[in-house]
Image (spheres, rainbow, N blue to C red):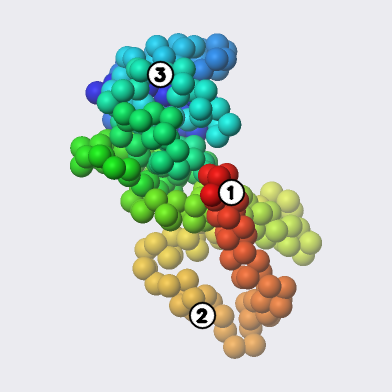
């Protein structure tokens, strides 16, 4: 089974590295196309995949096409691939571009729309995918194999993909902001910058793992930490008064709405 990547940016590179590392296929079964020779050469050197500058050439040599370009470049990339797409599985990680829009540009393809996040770079992505008409169980297995190589995979209906974009697609940025704030709080209380950041990172990692390992709702675990009239209660009172909970909810909603706007709805 051969894979063609149209686009060779950071996310495409992360997926290719994951596939090679997890032995989803042999490196020689992957070809990537990009107009930047230096980027392609770097990718070839680190993964041993094949590289070309032509989208049509890449698509012609593979049965599975992975679309990893910017939203504004989708129409051009698919037009360049042209008839080489006919009858093939098109897997798109492009934010905001719907299955219907992809099918209108590549009518004879079977389409799976995917939303990974930047943690793919360390094989810790939260990835959701939605399938279009005609996608077979075998096609789904292909998508799950590819994206399991970079983290956890969750099937959803396409109507939920913008919500996924708002939550897990944009979510790493929210987490980094919270980490930065936690660290700054430690520095404000006298900790060194490095120690404050190390403590903040491990605290967030540990808290997330507690949710995963115990299967408890976060509210239950929060109550376990919160003693009456204690230090945690004092801190939580400030966060609630500042509207942090509602601000995070609105951030997810705003990002989801922006994804909807990008899709032209």
- Nearest to N terminus: mark 2 or mark 3: 3
- Image location (x, y in percent) of residue 198: 62, 52
Q: How far apart, in angstroms, are the residues tagged by discs 3 and 1?
A: 27 Å
State left or right for residue 184 relative to residue 145: right
State left or right for residue 126 relative to residue 140: right
Q: Nearer the viewer, residue 226 or 216?
A: 216
Q: Name which residue lies at 77% across and 64% down.
A: 189
Q: Nearer the viewer, residue 40 or 237?
A: 40
State left or right for residue 124 relative to residue 149: right
The residue to which callout 1 is attached is: 261
Instruction: Relative to 11, say whether 208 is above or below.
Output: below
In the image, farthest residue toward the bottom: 228
- Image location (x, y in percent) of residue 245: 61, 70
**Where on the picture, by quarter, is residue 81?**
top left
The residue to which callout 3 is attached is: 82
The residue to which callout 2 is attached is: 223
Q: Quadrant of the N terminus?
A: top left
Q: Secondary structure at mark 1?
A: helix
Q: How far apart, in angstroms, are the residues tagged by discs 2 and 1?
A: 38 Å
Q: Name which residue lies at 46% across and 77% down.
A: 220
Mark 2 surroundings within 10 Å by alpha-carbon count, few (fewer than 14), some (14 through 19), many (20 or more) = few
Asked if the residue under mark 1 is in contact with the one under mark 2, i.e. CB atoms within 8 Å, the reply is: no
């Amino acid at each position: 089974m051969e894979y063609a990547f149209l686009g060779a940016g950071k996310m495409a590179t992360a997926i290719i590295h994951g596939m090679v590392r997890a032995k989803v296929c042999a490196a020689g079964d992957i070809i990537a196309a990009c107009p930047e020779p230096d980027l392609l050469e770097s990718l070839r050197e680190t993964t041993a995949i094949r590289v070309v500058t032509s989208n049509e050439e890449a698509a012609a040599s593979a049965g599975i096409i992975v679309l990893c370009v910017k939203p504004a470049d989708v129409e051009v990339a698919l037009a360049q691939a042209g008839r080489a797409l006919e009858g093939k599985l098109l897997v798109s990680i492009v934010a905001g571009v719907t299955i219907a829009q992809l099918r209108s540009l590549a009518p004879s393809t079977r389409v799976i729309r995917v939303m990974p996040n930047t943690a793919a770079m360390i094989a810790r992505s939260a990835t959701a995918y939605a399938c279009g008409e005609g996608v077979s169980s075998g096609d789904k297995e292909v998508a799950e194999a590819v994206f399991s190589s970079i983290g956890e995979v969750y099937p959803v209906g396409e109507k939920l993909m913008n919500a996924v974009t708002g939550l897990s697609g944009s979510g790493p940025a929210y987490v980094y902001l919270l980490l930065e704030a936690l660290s700054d709080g430690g520095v404000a209380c006298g900790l060194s910058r490095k120690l404050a950041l190390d403590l903040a990172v491990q605290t967030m990692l540990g808290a997330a793992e507690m949710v995963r390992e115990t299967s408890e709702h976060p509210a239950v675990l929060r109550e376990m930490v919160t003693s009456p009239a204690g230090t945690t209660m004092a801190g939580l009172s400030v966060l609630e008064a500042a509207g942090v909970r509602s601000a995070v909810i609105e951030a997810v909603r705003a990002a989801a709405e922006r994804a909807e706007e990008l899709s032209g709805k």
